[in-house]
């Protein structure tokens, strides 16, 4: 890979000529692919809170490419602390929520600025899933709990909160999102838990066990047959512990759903 000079670095990480580029481009991938010389330059820039915020506002905040592993790699490679990242993201969220609100705008009121603001607002919530501490998770929970906010912001906050929830807290937190007082769209949360969250927790056996325990317990109380059927199939393929559990058998027998073998 050819080395890039400072000018190239700024073009890659700061250029955002249009809303289309924000949706289709992937500045995070571009940054992660930079050579060491360019990384060293950005590490210095990112020590400054205002410059870190500027880089995110100009492209890094976009939701494309904001995957858990990539966000963690970004923090490590560029030396950005959880504290600095969270403070910057919460600042951006507060500013954007004033500018665009927490709801989609109908076509007649939609503007270039509000489209970008809504896109970046969701992106900032996603990024909190890579750095939120207790304060950050409480902030995410406040978004989830606010029924006046558009559902896709609340769902995104659920996902980010769960990414930052450890094994000890997972079962209680996930249960609240599935059948408790913090549920928003349970079907989507189930799918997120048994696919993205479970799969991204590879190497953390305790976290995976907590996810299985929460989903197993909630399925035993779930009344939606389609949810039970779909989620059971997905989880049974991933967890032999769940596939062979008496809780699973009882949940399926309750609604006369055939039991299929599964598990890894």
Image (tube, rainbow, N blue to C red):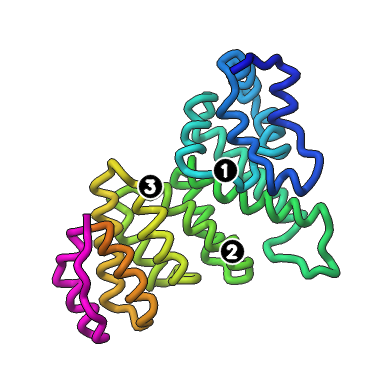
Instruction: List the residue tagged with mark 2.
Output: 152
Which element type, helix, strand or loop, lies under badge 3? helix
Is residue 212 positioned above or below 107 on the image?
Answer: above
Identify which residue, 193 or 182, lies in the foreground: 193
Specify the quadrant that holds the C terminus: bottom left
Residue 111 position within the rendered picture, expressed as x and y whole percent measured from the top left: 84, 58
Q: Is residue 88 magenta?
A: no
Provide the residue span drawn in magenta: 240-264
When asked about the image quadrant of residue 5, the answer is top right
Observer-side mark, 3 or 2, equals: 3
Left or right: where 214 falls relative to 227: left
Left or right: where 114 falls relative to 74: right
Distance of mark 3 from mark 1, alpha carbons? 15 Å
Left or right: where 148 falls relative to 164: right
Instruction: List the residue tagged with mark 1.
Output: 65
Is residue 253 positioned above or below 135 on the image?
Answer: below
Marks 2 and 1 close (CB-CB < 8 Å): no
Between discs 2 and 1, the one toward the N terminus: 1
- At a point 22% along the width and 72% down the height, the residue shown is 260
For the image, the number of numbered tags is 3
Distance of mark 2 from mark 1, alpha carbons? 18 Å
Q: Residues within 10 Å of mark 2 (few under 14, many from 20)?
A: some
Residue 62 position within the rendered picture, expressed as x and y whole percent measured from the top left: 65, 45
When asked about the image quadrant of residue 236, the answer is bottom left
Instruction: List the residue tagged with mark 3.
Output: 200
């Amino acid at each position: 890979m050819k080395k890039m000079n400072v000018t190239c670095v700024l073009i890659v990480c700061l250029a955002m000529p249009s809303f289309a580029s924000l949706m289709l481009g992937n500045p995070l991938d571009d940054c992660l692919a930079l050579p060491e010389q360019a990384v060293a330059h950005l590490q210095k820039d990112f020590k400054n809170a205002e410059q870190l915020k500027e880089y995110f506002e100009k492209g890094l905040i976009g939701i494309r490419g904001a995957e858990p592993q990539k966000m963690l790699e970004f923090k490590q490679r560029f030396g950005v602390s959880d504290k600095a990242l969270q403070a910057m993201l919460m600042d951006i969220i507060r500013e954007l929520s004033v500018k665009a609100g927490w709801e989609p705008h109908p076509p007649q009121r939609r503007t270039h600025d509000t489209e970008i603001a809504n896109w970046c607002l969701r992106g900032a919530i996603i990024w909190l899933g890579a750095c939120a501490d207790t304060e950050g998770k409480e902030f995410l929970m406040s978004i989830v709990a606010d029924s006046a906010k558009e559902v896709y912001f609340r769902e995104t906050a659920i996902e980010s909160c769960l990414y930052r929830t450890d094994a000890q807290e997972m079962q209680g937190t996930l249960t609240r999102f599935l059948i408790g007082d913090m549920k928003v769209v349970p079907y989507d949360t189930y799918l997120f838990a048994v696919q993205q969250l479970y799969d991204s927790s590879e190497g953390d056996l305790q976290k995976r066990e907590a996810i299985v325990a929460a989903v197993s317990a909630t399925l035993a109380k779930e009344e939606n047959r389609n949810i039970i059927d779909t989620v059971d199939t997905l989880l049974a393929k991933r967890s032999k512990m769940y596939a062979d559990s008496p809780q699973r058998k009882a949940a399926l027998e309750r609604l006369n759903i055939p039991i299929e073998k599964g598990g890894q």
